[in-house]
Amino acid sequence: MPAGKLLRLQQYKEARTFTVRKYHIVPPCTTKYLWTKKVSAPVKNASYLWQLVG
Protein backbone atom coordinates (compact mmCIF):
# COMPACT_ATOMS: atom_id res chain seq x y z
CA MET A 1 0.00 0.00 0.00
CA PRO A 2 1.47 3.40 -0.95
CA ALA A 3 2.23 5.87 1.85
CA GLY A 4 -0.64 8.25 2.55
CA LYS A 5 -3.33 6.07 0.93
CA LEU A 6 -6.37 5.53 3.13
CA LEU A 7 -8.37 2.27 3.02
CA ARG A 8 -11.30 1.05 5.06
CA LEU A 9 -12.02 -2.49 6.21
CA GLN A 10 -15.45 -3.74 5.10
CA GLN A 11 -17.27 -6.74 6.53
CA TYR A 12 -19.32 -9.12 4.36
CA LYS A 13 -21.63 -11.97 5.35
CA GLU A 14 -20.53 -15.22 3.74
CA ALA A 15 -23.04 -16.58 1.22
CA ARG A 16 -23.41 -19.43 -1.25
CA THR A 17 -24.70 -19.17 -4.81
CA PHE A 18 -26.71 -22.02 -6.34
CA THR A 19 -29.22 -22.73 -9.09
CA VAL A 20 -32.91 -23.35 -8.37
CA ARG A 21 -35.09 -25.16 -10.92
CA LYS A 22 -38.87 -25.33 -10.64
CA TYR A 23 -40.89 -28.20 -12.08
CA HIS A 24 -44.61 -28.92 -12.09
CA ILE A 25 -45.91 -32.49 -11.79
CA VAL A 26 -48.39 -33.21 -14.57
CA PRO A 27 -50.57 -36.33 -14.62
CA PRO A 28 -49.77 -39.15 -15.37
CA CYS A 29 -46.51 -38.77 -13.37
CA THR A 30 -44.56 -36.57 -15.75
CA THR A 31 -42.78 -33.32 -15.00
CA LYS A 32 -42.97 -30.02 -16.82
CA TYR A 33 -40.02 -27.61 -16.54
CA LEU A 34 -41.09 -24.06 -15.53
CA TRP A 35 -38.03 -21.89 -14.81
CA THR A 36 -34.43 -21.67 -13.55
CA LYS A 37 -32.97 -18.96 -11.33
CA LYS A 38 -29.53 -18.35 -9.78
CA VAL A 39 -29.86 -17.30 -6.13
CA SER A 40 -27.48 -16.28 -3.37
CA ALA A 41 -28.24 -17.16 0.24
CA PRO A 42 -26.29 -16.42 3.45
CA VAL A 43 -24.76 -19.32 5.34
CA LYS A 44 -26.36 -20.20 8.67
CA ASN A 45 -23.27 -19.86 10.88
CA ALA A 46 -21.74 -16.50 11.85
CA SER A 47 -19.05 -16.56 9.17
CA TYR A 48 -17.91 -13.14 7.99
CA LEU A 49 -15.47 -12.08 5.29
CA TRP A 50 -13.29 -8.97 5.41
CA GLN A 51 -11.94 -6.87 2.53
CA LEU A 52 -9.91 -3.67 2.25
CA VAL A 53 -11.82 -1.12 0.14
CA GLY A 54 -10.24 2.04 -1.16
Image (cartoon, rainbow, N blue to C red):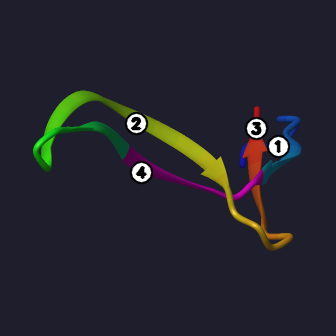
Report, in whole angstroms, how far the alpha carbon at label 1 lies from the one at label 3: 16 Å
What residue sits 85% from the left and 45% below the top?
Answer: 10
Q: Is 38 left or right of 14, judged from the image as shown? A: left
Q: Are marks 4 and 2 in contact (CB under 8 Å)?
A: yes
What residue sits 38% from the left and 43% below the top?
Answer: 20
Q: Which residues are magenta?
A: 13-19
- Residue tagged by mark 2? 38
- Residue tagged by mark 4? 18
Name which of mark 1 and mark 4 comes first in the sequence.
1
Q: Amino acid at mark 4?
A: Phe
Instruction: Give how far across and how far down residue 22 sits, in percent.
Output: 33, 37
Q: Amino acid at mark 3?
A: Val
Crowd class of label 4 (few under 14; some 14 to 19; many from 20; radius 10 Å): few
Q: Residue furthest front?
A: 28
Which element is circle 2 on?
strand
Q: Amino acid at mark 1?
A: Ala
What residue sits 18% from the left and 32% below the top?
Answer: 33
What residue sits 76% from the left and 38% below the top?
Answer: 53
Report, in whole angstroms, how far the alpha carbon at label 1 lies from the one at label 4: 41 Å
Name which of mark 2 and mark 3 comes first in the sequence.
2
Q: Nearer the viewer, mark 1 or mark 3?
A: 3
- Residue tagged by mark 3? 53
Report, in whole angstroms, how far the alpha carbon at label 3 lies from the one at label 4: 26 Å
- Closer to the camera, 35 or 52? 35
Q: Is 4 left or right of 35, judged from the image as shown? A: right
Q: Magenta stretch containing residue 14, yes or no?
A: yes
Q: Nearer the viewer, mark 2 or mark 1?
A: 2
Compared to 11, does 33 lie above or below? above
Q: Quadrant of residue 28?
A: top left
Crowd class of label 3 (few under 14; some 14 to 19; many from 20; radius 10 Å): few
- Residue tagged by mark 1? 3
Q: Are marks 2 and 3 in contact (CB under 8 Å)?
A: no
